[in-house]
Image (cartoon, helix red, strand yellow):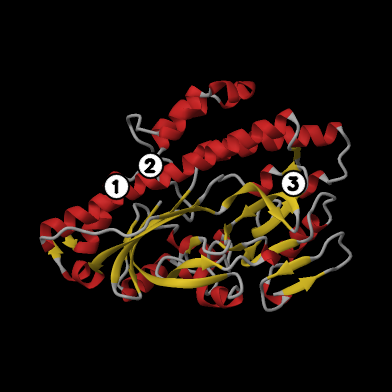
Amino acid sequence: MFVLYDGTKYPMKIWQKDIGNIEDSCIEQAQHLADLPFIHKWVALMPDTHTGMGMPIGGVIATKGVIIPNSVGVDIGCGMNFIDTDIDAADVKELMTGNGSGVQAIIGNFMRNIPVGTARHQKPQMCESIDIALKEIDKYQEDSELIPLLEDGYYQVGTLGGGNHFVELQEDDKGKLCIMIHSGSRHLGKAICDYFNKKAIMLNDMYYSSVPSEHRLAFLPVDSAEGKNYINWMKLAMDYAFENRARMMDVAKQAVTDIVKKYLDRDVIYGEEINCHHNYAALENHFGKNVWVHRKGANRARVGDKAVIPGAMGSYSYVVEGLGNPDSFTSSSHGAGRAYSRTGAMQRFTTEEVMRDLHEQGVILGKAKKNDVAEECRFAYKDIDEVMEQQSDLVRPIRKMKTVGVLKG
């Protein structure tokens, strides 16, 4: 970690070897954050940091009395879900079914039962977070424009989305089969962010905010009606994202159980499920102050917190335990971080190169359209082991996993 203090109101603490490893645009966004009048102590950048919308991905800030919708992001509650099994991954990879290997059969089941991209369920699904919201509808009525999203949520819960979201089968460092899911709050979170960001812009213009509009960091005072309403909607989106991942995990576990029971004639014992957010804001106490910690692409890493840090498909991922470092506001990276933008990756790597690489590693890819697969190839991301080395004071690795099969949008 090094500290950058270049004429801004507050310093920046950056978990990288040096500034040369970070895009200029990412540093510029961090400098904008470090000039905000309501920042508490400093801006923290995790080792996976890269340019985002208004605020760097892999960025953490603590604010006094305000919340910034764009510093939470459009995919509110995006995060990871992970579970391990007592099954030897080799047994599943080597068995043959009527639909190919065991891994191929399981990934095929994922493709049939987990809607991806813009697809949704044809019938409404059970969703406790939406049920509760409808019972507490008075909390949300002031923002009537968003109310139709609640009924719509019944059709999207248990769906993956696209981009960097995935469902993976993995083999851990003990040879056991694991399942890992990356997804968020789907359209609900994006609509909430966009709606309240517009409100924040209007309020900031009305009261002549000193925060330049072009920095995309419009804020809401947390004691204002708009701020309180945003927090209510944000918490709903977080609960929905948590449930969305849990519903997909139920489907994934059933797919694994069915194959193992049918072809290996045994039951599956599942371990502890880890379901954690990495796009959100929360009221926490740091350095003696109650502040709103915004984690945009960052895990909470208090002492003993368990979290999941994915690399990229065909790469390695980690389950970690937090060390509670106060300098990062008890946070860590949320992944490897992009080395190339989506467009840059598409220009640099061909579909054929990526598919050949996955084949050589024995990774089964479940994806309907392959033409954009380079966007999410492992070459488009930083080296996850280097990222882990740079945050050895933030988290302790407790499990390492390798992709054996993956469902992508």
Residue that label 3 marks: 216
Residue 246 shown left or right of residue 396 in the figure: left
Viewport quadrant of the N terminus: bottom right
In front of the other: label 3 or label 2? 2
Residue 31 shown left or right of residue 17 in the figure: right
Question: Where does the image place residue 224, in percent across and percent down from the top left?
Answer: 75, 31
Q: Quadrant of residue 119?
A: top left
Question: Where does the image place residue 247, in percent across and percent down from the top left?
Answer: 36, 44
Question: Where does the image place residue 320, in percent across and percent down from the top left?
Answer: 48, 67
Which three-letter amino acid code belongs to the residue tagged 3? Arg
Residue that label 2 marks: 158
| Cα–Cα span, label 3 and label 1 | 38 Å
Say what secondary structure mark 3 lies in: loop
In front of the other: label 3 or label 1? 1
Q: Are marks 3 and 1 in contact (CB under 8 Å)?
A: no
Residue that label 1 marks: 251
Which three-letter amino acid code belongs to the residue tagged 2? Gly
Question: Residue placed at 36% from the left, 70% from the top?
Answer: 358
Say what secondary structure mark 1 lies in: helix
Q: Are marks 1 and 2 in contact (CB under 8 Å)?
A: yes
Question: Residue placed at 40% from the left, 38% from the top?
Answer: 157
Q: Counting residues from the N terminus, which is met first, the one under dot 3 or under dot 2?
A: 2
Q: Quadrant of residue 27?
A: bottom right
